[in-house]
Amino acid sequence: MWHAVAYVCDVLHPVDAEATMLFTLAEMNPLRLFEKYLRPLVERCVGEVKEAEVGDIYFDPGIGLVIEYIARHSRGAVSAKLIYSHSPEKALAAYYARRGRP
């Protein structure tokens, strides 16, 4: 079963989002996904987010979708990811492997 999760501060959080809307916004306006699903989680972890940008988008039809955001706050920046997959852990591993990270 495919589902959406947010990966924020090394914790997976379930996200109630429909696949059609996720893919549409990922293509047209991925920052709206950050605002709707990730900003509240990131702010609980690091405090107020000053700005956010899309770091990268990864899609593999067999693995899923990973959108990385870089959220800047008063003490620096943090990476947060929105994942849509049947296995979020595998999608995250594939995302990092593609970028040459363990």
Image (cartoon, helix red, strand yellow):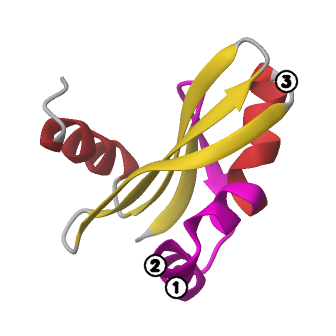
Q: CA distance from mark 3 to mark 2?
A: 28 Å
Looking at the image, residue 9 lies above or below residue 31: above
The magenta segment is 8-35
Which residue does the image show at 52% across and 85% down from the upper left? Answer: 24
> Looking at the image, is mark 3 or mark 2 earlier in the sequence?
2
Which residue does the image show at 69% across and 67% down from the upper left? Answer: 32
Looking at the image, residue 67 lies above or below residue 90: below
Q: CA distance from mark 1 to mark 2?
A: 5 Å
Is 16 magenta? The answer is yes
Q: Which mark is residue 27?
A: 2
* Residue 60 x %, y %: 21, 67
* Residue 62 x %, y %: 18, 70
**Amino acid at dot 2:** Glu
Q: Which mark is residue 47?
A: 3
**Amino acid at dot 3:** Gly
> Looking at the image, is mark 1 or mark 3 earlier in the sequence?
1
Residue picked out by circle 1: 24
Is 77 magenta? The answer is no
Is residue 14 rendered to the left or right of residue 94?
right
The quarter of the image holding the C terminus is top left
**Amino acid at dot 1:** Thr
Q: Residues within 10 Å of mark 3 (few under 14, many from 20)?
A: some
Task: Check contact, mark 1 vs mark 2: CB within 8 A.
Answer: yes
The quarter of the image holding the N terminus is bottom left
63 or 68: which is nearer to us? 68
Looking at the image, residue 57 lies above or below residue 38: below
Looking at the image, residue 73 lies above or below residue 76: below
* Residue 39 x %, y %: 76, 46
